[in-house]
Image (cartoon, rainbow, N blue to C red):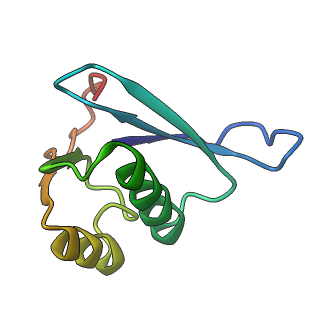
Amino acid sequence: MDLVGPLPKSARGHEHILVIADYATRYPEAVPLRKATAKNIAQELFLLSSRVGIPAEILTDQGTPFMSRLMTELCRLLQVKQLHLPPANGRARGAL
């Protein structure tokens, strides 16, 4: 799971894209977000889980929204293991 943005604001006010890829199936989801907040990300993750099931693990970078107490609590409640990539240290990152 990763965030793309900020991008130029769309006609509907979206500036970010939450990208979620299932490692097993390689099925991608791209969710437009107006704001890249932990609350918005947690809500979209919950909605996705209600459609396709709860993941066993989530891999993210160490961005503020992914490291928030809200995301930690959501993962605890859903029994999802949070995995975080180490900081890039100035190197170009590969796709998640």
Residue 66: quadrant of the picture: bottom left
- Residue for point 89% across, 40% down: 11
Q: Position of residue 55 (x, y in %)?
A: 20, 48
In the depicted structure, whether residue 7 falls above or below residue 50: above
Q: Is residue 41 left or right of residue 2?
A: right
Q: Position of residue 40 (x, y in %)?
A: 54, 64
Q: Nearer the viewer, residue 79 or 68?
A: 79
Q: Nearer the viewer, residue 58 or 54?
A: 54
Q: Nearer the viewer, residue 43 or 36?
A: 43
In the depicted structure, whether residue 27 falls above or below residue 52: above
Q: Quadrant of the C terminus?
A: top left
Q: Is residue 21 left or right of residue 23?
A: right
- Residue for point 40% across, 64% down: 65
In the depicted structure, whether residue 9 falls above or below residue 40: above
Q: Position of residue 33 (x, y in %)?
A: 63, 50
- Residue for point 68% across, 37% down: 7
Q: Is residue 77 left or right of residue 43?
A: left
Residue 62: quadrant of the picture: bottom left
- Residue for point 45% across, 68% down: 38
Q: Is residue 67 left or right of residue 47?
A: left
In the depicted structure, whether residue 27 falls above or below residue 8: above
Residue 72: quadrant of the picture: bottom left
Q: Position of residue 32 (x, y in %)?
A: 63, 43
